[in-house]
Image: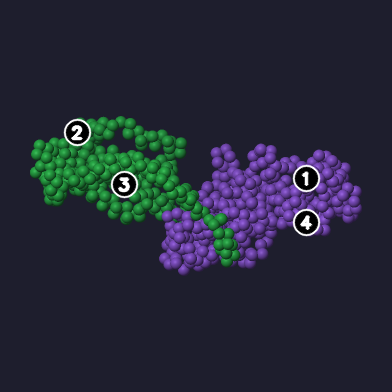
């Protein structure tokens, strides 16, 4: 599946910068009969913080390793600033990698770890540069320590410094925060974003954590089974997913089967179990036949059965609350609909909303603009990891 | 500053530094040490003291007249001056064969660790397989391999590497070949063990950081395999320096090493003080060299 390139980048200010894009053209990688990456086209503009997001085994790490030169593409070309690097040895490429396991050299101290790339390129006086770089990652006084003497977060920053000091045209990050605990991960996300803004180098970040991708990246490409399902700004992907996979992998979605019945201005009108539901045409991936009607759980409001709702709302009535989970900032409801499907609703605990208990009969309503339509040929549970885990199937 | 501060605040929870398990002080540890200690005292400490004592006996004593402890230090001087050549030969032969074993073993261990794929176990078995036959039998086999009518000598003569009357058996070459062969597995196995432990991602990282294949080897693989290299060279050098079977079977008295001399002094000439003095000198020389070597290699943790 080919993907569009992103819209104009605000960082792209001059022609030379625009020329340093990373481009993958119909890149395929097969391991035996298994196709890890399938005819991938991708343009990452210079200076971007780009995230490759997908579940394990989707080909994102293989893609990264092909850019790094650690795997050779079966076919296709990879260029940076117009130069074809597809068959170059890794040590000849203008890219550096922050490895998932950090891969710090245990026999060298932190200073020598960071200086490694400079020394290999014959840079004579590395002291100043290494110290500046250690300052940048806030490890100024740690030069003489050995990697095992540092904490996970500190090792992670050494790995970042070791790669960044070489001023690569593209910095590759392979699940760099995977080994950190949640709190530290949050802080490192902000830190990484700060450093990226400071150095202005293109970051290509591979992760399976959708929150991490959305927090840091300007552009996210969602990968599944070797192809990019959708690419765009985080908000765009979230609000207007192109496939069921994206709608489930990035956040949660309620997907209900419906038939398209007609048009109403800019809206597509569909029939859901006898109820009329409208969706903006711009968010409809399919405008005829059977579709999935999608809406995010936090966009849906609950009301007692038959109570007044504002005009023009999409309304699905006659549900029964089957489960209530109090999360703190919000309450998560499961509502069993008359056609025996459970839908999810998040209500903000703002105090202004009524709360419901199990057994209450409720109506679900939401603004038509928050509705999206997807192709009903796609699996409604694609990308839904909790569903896959419960069903015992592969993720 | 935010992350550093937060990490400091988070304290040890994020650290990878292992917390040492609480030590229980008690007698059970010493009790468990007892069999080993007893073994060492009986079979190492007592014999060593006995050996050192013997080396200082009056050299004019004999089995019939008995030996008197006269603190006869000249025994050492006598041993050194009388047997200088075998001493030096031992060191040279052991050094050369250790070097050769290293040259053979490193590529082999590297191949087993990184390139053997599903043949790994078979290759390891092949390295160990010679131990299933006796050391003596294997060394005798080399006698026929290197014999004057053997294939090897004929080929070397045909290639004019050896003269028409040239021979391998009964030369230093034969002894060094035997030593190298016999101690090769002791070099391969520690090297394999430390190469095998190397995280391949470190090699990838070095390639990512502008090191080509050879530089990656020199700067990452080789330093990380140093513990195995040091252990392997010690396990080869120490027994090779004290060996006497190879010189006995593949050499002539002209190739005799200090091991042959000690053997002969103890069992043929019955000159116990001289034999003990030679043994102590060999032992001290090896310990001194090993200490120097391990210091230089920066792998003190092996000792």
Q: Are marks 1 and 4 on the same chain?
A: yes
Residue that sits furthest to the bottom in the current view: A128
Crowdedness near tag 3: few (<14), some (14–19) or many (≥20) residues, C-alpha within 10 Å: many
Q: Is residue A41 left or right of residue B85?
A: right
Callout 2: SS: loop
Between circles 2 and 3, the one closer to the viewer is 3
Parent chain of label 1: A
Callout 4: SS: loop
Q: Position of residue A305 (x, y in %)?
A: 88, 48
Q: Which mark is residue B70?
A: none
Position of B156 relative to A8 (above/below): above
Cα–Cα gap, marks 2 and 3: 32 Å
**Colour scheme of this structure image?**
by chain
Q: Position of residue A94 (x, y in %)?
A: 52, 58
Q: Position of residue B98 (x, y in %)?
A: 28, 45
Q: Are marks 2 and 3 on the same chain?
A: yes
The hue of chain A in the figure is purple
Parent chain of label 3: B
Cα–Cα gap, marks 1 and 3: 69 Å
Q: Are marks 2 and 4 on the same chain?
A: no
Crowdedness near tag 1: few (<14), some (14–19) or many (≥20) residues, C-alpha within 10 Å: some
């Amino acid at each position: 599946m080919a993907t569009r390139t992103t819209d104009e980048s605000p960082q792209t200010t001059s022609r030379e910068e625009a020329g340093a894009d990373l481009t993958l053209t119909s890149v395929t990688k097969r391991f035996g009969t298994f196709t890890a990456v399938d005819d991938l086209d991708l343009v990452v503009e210079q200076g971007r913080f780009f995230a490759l997001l997908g579940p394990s085994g989707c080909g994102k790490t293989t893609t990264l390793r092909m850019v790094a030169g650690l795997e050779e593409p079966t076919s296709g070309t990879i260029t940076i600033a117009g130069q074809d690097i597809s068959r170059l040895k890794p040590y000849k490429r203008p890219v550096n990698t922050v490895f998932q396991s950090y891969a710090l050299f245990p026999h060298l101290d932190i200073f020598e770890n960071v200086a490694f790339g400079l020394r290999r390129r014959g840079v004579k006086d590395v002291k100043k540069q290494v110290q500046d770089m250690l300052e940048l990652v806030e490890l100024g006084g740690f030069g003489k320590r050995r990697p095992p003497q540092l904490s996970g977060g500190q090792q992670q920053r050494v790995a970042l410094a070791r790669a960044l000091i070489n001023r690569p045209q593209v910095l590759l990050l392979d699940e760099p925060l995977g080994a950190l605990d949640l709190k530290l991960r949050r802080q490192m996300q902000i830190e990484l974003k700060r450093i990226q803004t400071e150095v202005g180098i293109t970051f290509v970040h591979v992760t399976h954590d959708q929150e991490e991708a959305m927090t840091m990246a300007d552009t996210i490409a969602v990968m599944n089974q070797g192809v990019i399902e959708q690419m765009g700004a985080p908000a765009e992907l979230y609000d207007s997913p192109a496939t069921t996979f994206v709608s489930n992998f990035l956040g949660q979605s309620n997907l209900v089967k419906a038939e398209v019945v007609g048009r109403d201005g800019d809206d597509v009108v569909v029939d859901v179990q006898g109820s009329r539901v409208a969706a903006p045409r711009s968010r409809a991936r399919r405008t005829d036949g059977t579709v999935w009607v999608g809406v995010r759980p936090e966009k849906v409001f609950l009301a007692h059965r038959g109570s007044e709702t504002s005009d023009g709302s999409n309304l699905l009535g006659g549900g029964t609350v089957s489960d209530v989970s109090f999360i703190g900032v919000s309450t998560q409801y499961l509502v069993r609909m008359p056609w025996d499907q459970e839908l999810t609703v998040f209500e903000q605990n703002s105090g202004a909303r009524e709360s419901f208990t199990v057994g209450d009969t409720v109506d679900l309503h939401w603004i038509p603009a928050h509705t999206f339509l997807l192709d009903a040929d796609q699996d409604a549970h694609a990308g839904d990891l909790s569903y896959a885990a419960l069903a015992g199937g592969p993720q | 500053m935010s992350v550093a501060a937060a990490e400091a605040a988070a304290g040890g929870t994020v650290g990878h530094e292992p917390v040492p398990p609480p030590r229980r002080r008690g007698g059970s540890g010493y009790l468990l040490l007892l069999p080993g200690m007893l073994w060492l005292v009986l079979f190492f400490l007592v014999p060593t003291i006995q050996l050192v004592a013997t080396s200082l006996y009056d050299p004019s004593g004999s089995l019939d007249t008995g030996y008197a402890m006269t603190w006869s230090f000249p025994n050492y001087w006598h041993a050194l001056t009388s047997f200088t050549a075998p001493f030096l030969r031992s060191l040279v032969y052991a050094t050369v064969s250790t070097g050769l074993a290293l040259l053979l073993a490193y590529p082999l261990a590297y191949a087993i660790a990184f390139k053997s794929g599903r043949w790994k176990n078979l290759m390891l078995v092949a390295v160990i397989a010679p131990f299933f036959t006796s050391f003596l039998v294997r060394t005798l086999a080399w006698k026929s391999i290197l014999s004057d009518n053997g294939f090897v000598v004929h080929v070397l003569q045909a290639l004019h590497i050896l003269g028409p009357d040239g021979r391998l058996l009964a030369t230093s070459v034969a002894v060094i070949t035997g030593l190298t062969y016999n101690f090769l597995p002791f070099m391969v196995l520690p090297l394999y063990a430390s190469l095998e432990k190397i995280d391949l991602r470190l090699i990838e990282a070095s390639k990512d950081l502008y090191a080509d294949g050879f530089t990656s080897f020199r700067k990452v693989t080789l330093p990380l395999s140093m513990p195995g290299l040091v252990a392997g060279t010690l396990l080869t050098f120490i027994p090779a320096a004290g060996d006497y079977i190879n010189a006995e079977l593949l050499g002539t008295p002209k190739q005799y090493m200090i091991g042959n001399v000690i053997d002969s002094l103890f069992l043929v000439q019955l000159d116990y003080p001289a034999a003990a003095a030679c043994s102590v000198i060999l032992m001290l020389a090896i310990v001194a060299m090993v200490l120097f070597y391990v210091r230089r290699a920066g792998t003190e943790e092996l000792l």
